[in-house]
Amino acid sequence: MPGYNAPNASTPVAPAPVWKDKWGAIALDKDAGDAGTIADRDTKAIAVHDAMSDCKARGAQGCKVVLTYYNQCAAIAWSDDSYGASTDKNLQMAEDGALGACRKNGTGCKIVYSACSMPERVR
């Protein structure tokens, strides 16, 4: 085809993708053993608010945000005498990190929550 890949021809460049951050948060009441969790929120403030609301809706009174994260995965491991929280780009690695953190101070640790809040392509 004449002019195809000619040295002076301009090749249109596709626009770069545009991504929107997605946030998550975890609130715990360690004494009551309750948690509030949320993922896929548009801002950190919304994630924190929704995690606290979820924790309180479960009847907990001493809820505190222990973890916020965006564009990655998070996990919580829990035992009778310890807990651990971790984030990572990979869900399995986040779970492994939470278990490791929990096992530093406790035994019988189990994953009680894990989720990912990955960025959303908007264009």
Image: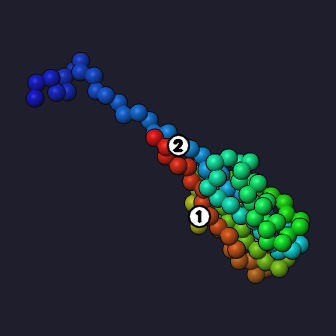
> Given the current orientation, which residue lies at the most extreme left position?
1
Kindly identify the amino acid type of the residue bearing the numbered disc 1.
Leu
- Which disc number belongs to residue 19? 2
User: Is residue 17 visible in the rendered structure shown here?
Assistant: yes
Q: Residue at x 89, y 67 (%)?
A: 61
Q: Say which label, 2 or 1, has the lower sequence index.
A: 2
Q: Assign a secondary structure to mark 1.
A: helix
Q: Is residue 31 above or below residue 47?
A: below
Say left or right for 55 vs 19: right
Within 10 angstroms of label 1, few (less than 14), some, or many (20 or more) residues? some
Q: CA distance from mark 2 to mark 1?
A: 20 Å
Kindly identify the amino acid type of the residue bearing the numbered disc 2.
Trp
> Given the current orientation, which residue lies at the most extreme top position?
8
- For the N terminus, the quadrant is top left
Q: Is residue 29 above or below residue 110?
A: above
Evaluate if marks 2 and 1 touch, with contact meaning CB atoms under 8 Å apart: no
Q: Nearer the viewer, residue 73 or 22?
A: 22
Count the numbered circles shown: 2
**Residue 58 in the image, given as x and y percentages of width and height:** 79, 71
Q: Residue at x 56, y 44 (%)?
A: 20
Q: Nearer the viewer, residue 106 or 34?
A: 34
Say left or right for 77 vs 39: right
Name the residue tied to disc 1.
91
**Residue 14 in the image, given as x and y percentages of width and height:** 36, 34
Q: Quadrant of residue 82?
A: bottom right
Q: Residue at x 79, y 60 (%)?
A: 52
**Residue 97 in the image, given as x and y percentages of width and height:** 68, 65
